[in-house]
Image (cartoon, rainbow, N blue to C red):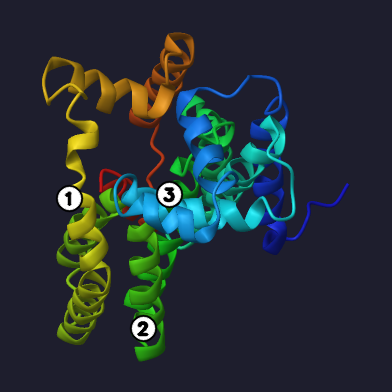
Amino acid sequence: MRRPPAALDPLIVGVLAAAVSLGGAGRPSFWYDEAATISASYSRSLQQLWQMLSNVDAVHGLYYLLMHAWFQIFPPTEFWSRAPSGLAVGAAAAGVVVLGKQFSSRTVALSSGVVCGILPRATWAGIEARPYALSMMAAVWLTVLFVHATRRDSAWLWLSYGIVLATSVLLDVYLTLLLLAYVAFLCLYRHSPTVLVRFAVASLLAGCAVAPVGVEAFGQVHQIVWIAPIGRRTIEDVAVQQYFERSPPFMIVSVLVVTTAVVLWLCTSAHLARGDRRLIRSSPL
């Protein structure tokens, strides 16, 4: 059998990743946060939703608006409420394939996309009627656009980057932290002054555009004061939960696979290709 064309790789991985998330999306009953999505997006008119966001959940305003439009077409059942999240996980995995191909081989890109689609935290987000899967999708494709803009250095690309950045931050305020990774990337690869200036201008304009929402969200910080502050549990959240989501067996298998790959590489005479070296250097970002 002939291998499918490389151009279809993102589509194939995206479909498989979405299928993994959506396969059992209709089984678990809604939990508290998902009920908040239904209440905000389905049970309220646009005017009532706007009034609610002026008091609570401004950080999820764009997601609630998108879900309000979704519920004009589909019923608020468990499956259909979670379908956008499952599709977003598929789009995120497809984006990882595209991003991987910008640095390394087709095999590396495909493997990365598959891993993204089956990570327990990704599948968790894919069966939850909350904005986290869409945030993941936005982060991946924003990064794809950012890398493409640094290489082509087109004014239109940087304009598109600024628009997508602003939209992404409206989905999740924490995506502003991606700017730190982007700055590190630009410093690491020593891009031209023109690229640095255009990146700074586009990011600054995007920040100014979403500043009112940020101010409103900061004024509602009392909503999450009950969440535990940074401490010993934070290490677990960052090192384990954000990838493996209460699945120690998956974490153990992942560690064994990575360790085996490192040992085999060190024990052989194979040398990493330039693209693979760049990918490894960039991955901590």
The x and y percentages for residue 138 are 44, 56
Q: Earlier in the sequence, mark 1 or mark 3?
A: 3
Q: Is residue 14 left or right of residue 36?
A: right
- Of the two numbered discs 1 and 2 in the rendering, the one whose residue sits closer to the viewer: 1
Residues packed near mark 1 inside 10 Å, few (<14), some (14 to 19) or many (20 plus) = few
How many numbered dots are placed on residues in this image? Answer: 3
Element carrying mark 2:
helix
In terms of depth relative to the viewer, which is nearer, 122 or 266? 122
In terms of depth relative to the viewer, which is nearer, 64 or 230? 64
| Disc number for residue 218 | 1
Furthest residue in direction top, as rendered: 249
Q: Looking at the image, which residue is at 78% across and 55% down?
A: 4
Residue contact at pointers 2 and 3, CB within 8 angstroms: no
Residue 104 makes an appearance in the image: no
Q: Is residue 285 left or right of residue 127?
A: left
Q: Earlier in the sequence, mark 2 or mark 3?
A: 3
The x and y percentages for residue 149 are 37, 77
The x and y percentages for residue 23 are 73, 29
Which amino acid, by three-letter code, is at mark 3? Ser
Q: Mark 1 and mark 2: span between their CA atoms?
A: 27 Å
Residue contact at pointers 1 and 2, CB within 8 angstroms: no
Residue under circle 3? 135
Up-down: is 105 above or below 26? below
Residues packed near mark 3 inside 10 Å, few (<14), some (14 to 19) or many (20 plus) = many
Up-down: is 168 above or below 201? above
Q: Looking at the image, which residue is at 47% across and 15% down?
A: 253
- Give residue 188's quadrant in the image: bottom left
- Of the two numbered discs 1 and 3 in the rendering, the one whose residue sits closer to the viewer: 1
Q: Is residue 207 left or right of residue 85?
A: left
Q: Earlier in the sequence, mark 1 or mark 2?
A: 2
Residue under circle 2? 159
